[in-house]
Amino acid sequence: MENNKYLLDMTDVVVHYETDEGIVEAVNGIDIKLAEGKTMGLVGETGCGKTTTALSILRLVPDPPGKVKSGKIILDGVDIMAASEKEMREIRGNVVSMIFQDPMTSLNPVLTVGDQIAEVVAIHNPQMKKEDTVKRAMEMLEVVGIPGERHTEYPHQFSGGMKQRVVIAIALACSPKLLIADEPTTALDVTIQAQVLELMNNLKQQFKTSTIMITHDLGIVAETCDEVSIMYAGSIVERGNLEDVFNNTMHPYTEGLFNSLPDVDNRAAKLKPIPGLMPDPTKLPKGCAFAPRCQYATEQCKTEKPALVKYSDTHYAACLAYQDKNFKLKGWSK
Amino acid sequence: MALLEVTDLRKYFKTPKGNLHAVDDVSFKIEEGKTLGVVGESGCGKSTTGRAVLRLLEPTAGKVVFDGQDVTALDKEALRQMRRKMQIVFQDPYSSINPRMSVSEIIAEPMKLHKMYATKAEVDAHTQELMKTVGLAERLTNSYPHELDGGRRQRIGIARALALDPKFIVCDEPVSALDVSIQAQILNLLQELQEQRGLTYIFITHDLSVVNYFSDDIAVMYLGRLIEKAPSEKLFANPSHPYTQALLSAIPLPKLGNKRERIILKGEITSPIEPKPMCRFAPRCIHAKDICFKEEPKMKEIAPGHEVMCHLF
Amino acid sequence: MEAKKTNKKRSMWGDVLKRLAKNRMAVLGGIIVVSLILIAICADFICDYEDEAIFQNVKIRLEGPSAEHILGTDEFGRDMFARIVHGSRISLLVGFFATMLAMVCGLILGSSAGYFGGKVDMIIMRVLDVFMAIPQLLLAITLVAAFGTSIGCLMIALGVSSVPSFSRMLRSQVITVKDQEFIEAARAIGAKDSHIITTHIIPNSLSPVIVQVSMRMASCILSISSLSFIGLGISPPTPEWGSMLSGGRMYLRDAQHITLYPGLAIMITILAFNLLGDGLRDALDPKLKR
């Protein structure tokens, strides 16, 4: 069986939101394959469909208005699309769990942090005794670097970075095989972000958890991920390992992202922003979604949707310009 | 002479537990046409500093001299007039513009308030010109903010600040709420405006890579104190305060290989309420000595233009 | 994005109306409210006031519905339909002005308390707290008893007793709006307090006020009827739903229709205003957008 190769195997997943203003084409045919123990960065800007992709793995896309139109998601050998709601509850938390961006709102303010961790443990281990779940909660707090005795405290007694640690503890309480982290450090300060990222890196090695790291920060990807997928307007435009994407950038959008980042080591380097705005997801262009902002776009790009093409064992890109064998990006200055 | 000179600026907030020292004896100067970057993490007092300079918050003590005038001594009407010269661009493009006003109404409001032009036609013409300057299409004139994305809203905020033709603008994290590609557009816009109009900026941010790109001088703040100040190249080449070093090393770089030695700070920011007379960074500092817990360090010049507040020097 | 293709002025209120139109119950409420207003305005064209609503004709008293008197006649032989139609005038008029009075006072007191805070806030809110401690109806009864039972007095009495709830709501709304950056932005461009309150704070605090107006209309109309029922509101022979109800209660056994119809009129009116208010609340809530 081919599926066994990957922990997560998403094929051609399409998710639409049917709103009054029109159909929002949030995710348009995404393939994600993630091997056990690996970390993949899912990079893109607001509204590109990163979070929707993640929610579709948990089958938590809000319905209505969201609809998973087609595609196949195999997680740990289970077909997510075909699973019953009961099976899904088993899977969520146990096989896959998610960390959300804002630690302030993802904890319940009226329960102690210990109870919140113990609750997750108890749901997935109904036979476990109350004392044991509490013990487990304390262990988990220690794992994320919080003294276990603090399990009787309430979320408001913790700072932002500490709260995010608690959220991580909850996510890892049932030792899931896949952890989805949705911008886990965006709400945190740089020095606290460094602490949390280091913690996540350590835990990943300790628990052998596969991770999908959703972020807009290519710096975080460089620090924490093994491979990376760049998303634009609901599609993956480039995918590969770090070396592929950072040093042999193929897609013009990826190049544009790098050009938009100030370089810490070179003050003189001018920013070269991508002109224009993301297309309205209710009215995506007929051809390549990036064509209206792309400096390399040709007439063909306006009418034809590029497919994700394999260029090496690991490196994929969706760009029509490479039909011309001699095409090369202008490159981004380092 | 410096365009803006701030001396021992102090802003305390009263809380039930005592005074919260948001900004404590901060001093700096900015030459005309230059940019001072103010960096620090949340709660370090960087935004409060920006607002106290403009007297959007009344400073508790200290002196702000702008263009030869003492801003802290102005009465209400004189301050209103002063606002024409000093402006601010806010962080959050969603809450910083009135959702019930159209784009042109927002941009025209300051001109109307100060009765800069005699006729409505003139105001309209200037509004159009400003929209063009900041890159807003003419068809958006009658649009409402909720129809626009963050980048466009931020352009409205910039146009509103420019409407009074100020000399000096406080940019309070103007790009931190925006996406990377839009962020670069706005940074470039701000830079072009500075070149065209000879603007002077205070650029407040938590993002060190942005501040490096944008500023001539950088001031690093920690818990209300300005702890290090230097020209940008110097600060990045030779960060001297242990906090600055940690802050610099914590930026995740979008590059492979050549990893910096990372300094992971222990703990989190301590309380700014009634701080003890000691170095405020000492509890998290890897180099902390006895004296650091007993005495607050003074600002020392360690190289021309490079000042540090640390007992190590 | 609408902005891309059009240059037309489309305010937030346009969106609100659109969302409101999708809510069937709210539309129903709206239609009833509009019809009531039309009935009140055109009452003189529908049936003559003096001849049908006031003129007593003992020969035909307590008659059931018939072709000539579609809702029957009351204990003095007056046409029920005409009296209910003309009664709507009093209810809506008093309800409207009482609510407006409360809204304007609430707007001024609530926004000053919220915007200035500190001592101003303390004084205004404590005074209003005292008013809050007295039940609305009791307060109205006291005022009417003290100043007489004219329509004007009734409006003021009901209006004053609604001021605290308007002020409280507006105060909390203003405090939320005040903390937003665009208020600071307005100060940064040199706007005066009065300008900030009128152009920035009030327009952004209005949505709950509109909901409240609709709900308050309902409760004011109910209060008028209650006051009239106990004889402190509109005095006979002026047609008023509450006093009609009160007059009819003697004949509950023989002629139910003379209590049934005014009762229905009160019920439908209040239901309509409440439905509209509920619909407005949903339509104005930005969280329910999309």
Image: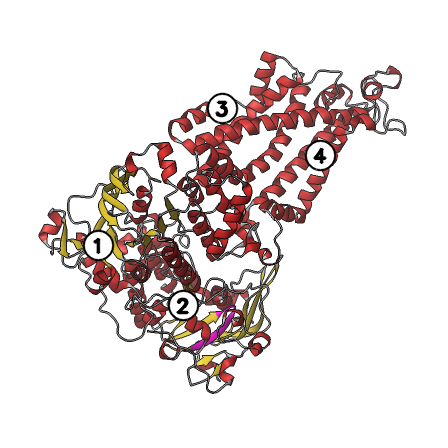
Q: Residue at x 60, y 23 (%)?
A: C158
Q: Chain of mark 4?
A: C
Amino acid marked by disc 1: Lys
Residue lying at the far bottom of the rendered structure: A325
Q: Is residue A233 magenta?
A: yes
**Chief secondary structure of the magenta span?**
strand
Q: Which mark is residue C133?
A: 3
Q: Return the mark for residue B229.
A: 1
Residue C137 placed where, x, y %?
A: 58, 22
Q: Is residue B263 magenta?
A: no
Q: Distance from label 1 to label 4 (Cα)? A: 72 Å
Chain at numbered mark 2: A
User: Considering the numbered disc 1 on the image, is that residue within a helix, a strand or a loop?
Assistant: strand
Which of these two is toward me, B239 or B42? B239
The subunit carrying tag 3 is C
**Residue A164 appears at what percent x and percent y?**
35, 58
**Real-space CA distance between mark 4 and mark 2, rounded to the nearest whole angstrom:** 65 Å
Callout 4: helix, strand or loop?
helix
Disc 4, disc 2: CB below 8 Å? no
- Which residue occupies 39% across, 66% down? A260
The disc at residue A272 is 2
Same chain? Circles 4 and 2? no
Q: How many discs appear?
A: 4
Q: Which residue is mark 4?
A: C268
Judge depth for marks 1 and 3 and give the one in front. 1
Q: Quadrant of residue C26?
A: top right
Task: Let me know if marks 1 and 2 both belong to one chain.
Answer: no
Q: Judge the density around disc 4: few (<14), some (14-19), many (≥20) Cα neighbours within 10 Å.
A: some
Residue A47: where, in percent of width, then height? Answer: 49, 62
Extent of the magenta region? A232-239
User: Which of the 4 image quarters holds residue C96?
Assistant: top right
Specify whether B53 is left or right of C161.
Answer: left
